DNA sequence: CCAATTAGTGTCATTACAACAATAAATATA
DNA sequence: TATATTTATTGTTGTAATGACACTAATTGG
């Protein structure tokens, strides 16, 4: 049974001791072609002055994803963005105050729209390059961040998630750069062109961007194809979901 | 921040309205070479008489996985078994009594050890072939089961999870049968032998099982290799984790 | 006009793999 | 004893994916 065993008459919610439930949202974006994560600086005990992943209580009337989107919007003003549930962290001692179970989400925000607001709950809000995140973070947030990075890396290999980090219009080499950065390895230019074009997820815009050398052709992501998930694969390795959450996160 | 913003002095856990948190455990096993799932029949309101996925409250002192293992043992008497977190379901109206957030796990139990006990919370406990599960289940358990099946199928493709369903000692064709059943398609015998042997995850036992034809060679799973996860891959398709949880579950 | 720079294409050999065929080893039973 | 049956293997072959690398293209700045 999912829950308690009471009849309608005898059921009394207040009889059971309950944990608190929060959502924490690991928000990634691309700034200057580099992967960044949003952190807030805590104003109060515990972990006062420490950086932490933004999050907050789940309210009684909202679903978990609604709560996550609300948090996301409160911190960044962004709506209608890619978000997915990551993992639920619930060790009894992860918060010194009381039992707190945190349902973690991760979100990808497009490079071209960020504006931050420091809520009055926090001292500061900032984007950090994932290579230079302050350590340690508050609570078990190092672990949550590591899990999010593992998931992100894993999903890039077999989904079109990378597009969610790019602006509306982008070049193929910009896309390649994202993969290289998150995988931590160089990819062959020719092979990349071939693969991405064969996948059929690009729409030509006809636009060009001029620069030092030959002008860059600009593309748009075809949302109709592959429908957000599951299109192609780079490399072989696959680790994701469940138990395997926190392996080989060292390189990023 | 993960949680509340209070100082040590002013913090009072009782000030916030809290949801209840349960774990539900989707337990799979193999009976007569067919995939089965454990269900319990509810004794009380709501969904009295309906079949449901076993589960229960998370206690204040135990981690989520500990809670899941406790539930698993209470229902089947089984310990030390493969278990992983599946997804957290938290729609506000999924339980008519109060807000209940359920952290779902899934577990794989070896074919050779099952014994069930009906707890006094339930009318009945039974293994159901996944092809013939009563419908609808209590609460949103149809959805939880579908998510679990998707995850199981997905993970068979790139992990050694299938071994967790087999008895200590098994034949290669029995292993092949599991894959065929869960993928819902026939695999080529020759290719299967080649692939599984090349993967180097089998240990020969020297045992033979005699039957009608040529005796079957029996193997053991080499736990040292591949270490529970990530060894080989069958087929290409990959859908898993997060958003993609509930797609193409129709065929099983 | 030439170097530098960024963009994009072509080729080729290797590998992985699926489909299919053939055969070998053992036993049961007619 | 012969034959069917089942498990256990080993080819063979064509196709598709992939990695390495060389080559061509378009533009700007000197």
Image (cartoon, coloured by chain):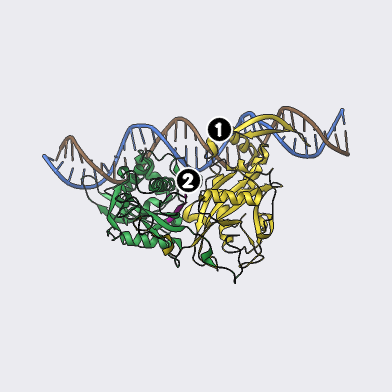
Chain colours: A green, B yellow, C brown, D blue
Neighbours of disc 1 within 10 Å: few (<14), some (14-19), many (20+)? few
Q: Is residue A35 above or below residue B189?
A: below
Residue A114 position, x and y percent, is 28, 57
Question: What segment carries the magenta color?
Answer: A84-94
Query: Which residue is pictured at 63% across the width and 41% down the height?
Result: B188
Q: Nearer the viewer, residue C4 or B90?
A: B90
Give the side of residue B115 with respect to residue A79, left or right.
right
- Residue B86 visible in this rendered orientation of the protein: yes
Position of the C terminus of chain A by quadrant: top left
Q: Chain of mark 2?
A: A
Front label number (2 vs 1): 1
- Which corner quadrant of the image does residue A186 belong to? top left
- Which corner quadrant of the image does residue B8 belong to? bottom left
Q: Nearer the viewer, residue C11 or B2?
A: B2
* Magenta-drawn stretch contains A91: yes
Q: Evaluate whether label 2 is on the same chain as label 1.
A: no
Q: Which residue is mark 1?
A: B224
Q: Chain of mark 1?
A: B
Residue A94 position, x and y percent, is 43, 49
* Magenta-drawn stretch contains B234: no
- Residue A78 visible in this rendered orientation of the protein: no
Residue B67 position, x and y percent, is 55, 51
Q: Nearer the viewer, residue B79 or A68?
A: B79
Q: Is residue A66 above or below residue D28?
A: below
Position of the N terminus of chain A by quadrant: bottom right
- Which corner quadrant of the image does residue B121 belong to? bottom right
In the rendered structure, find residue A240 and report the number of the disc placed on it. 2
């Amino acid at each position: 049974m999912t829950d308690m065993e009471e009849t309608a008459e005898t059921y009394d919610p207040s009889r059971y001791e309950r944990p608190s439930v929060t959502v924490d949202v690991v928000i990634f974006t691309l700034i200057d072609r580099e992967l960044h994560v949003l952190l807030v600086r805590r104003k109060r005990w515990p972990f006062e002055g420490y950086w932490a992943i933004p999050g907050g209580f789940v309210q009684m009337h909202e679903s978990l994803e609604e709560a996550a989107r609300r948090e996301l919007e409160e911190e960044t003003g962004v709506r209608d963005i890619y978000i997915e549930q990551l993992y639920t962290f619930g060790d009894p001692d992860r918060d010194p105050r009381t039992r707190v179970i945190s349902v973690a989400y991760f979100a990808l925000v497009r490079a071209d729209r960020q504006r931050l607001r420091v809520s009055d709950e926090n001292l500061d809000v900032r984007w950090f390059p994932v290579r230079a995140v302050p350590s340690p973070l508050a609570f078990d947030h190092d672990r949550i961040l590591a899990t999010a990075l593992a998931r992100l890396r894993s999903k890039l290999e077999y989904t079109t998630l990378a597009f969610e980090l790019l602006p509306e219009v982008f070049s193929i080499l910009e896309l390649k750069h994202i993969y290289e950065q998150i995988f931590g390895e160089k990819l062959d230019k020719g092979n990349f062109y071939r693969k991405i074009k064969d996948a059929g997820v690009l729409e030509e815009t006809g636009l060009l961007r001029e620069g030092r050398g030959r002008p860059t052709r600009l593309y748009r992501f075809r949302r109709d194809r592959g429908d957000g998930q599951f299109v192609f694969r780079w490399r072989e390795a696959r680790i994701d979901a469940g138990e395997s959450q926190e392996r080989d996160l060292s390189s990023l």
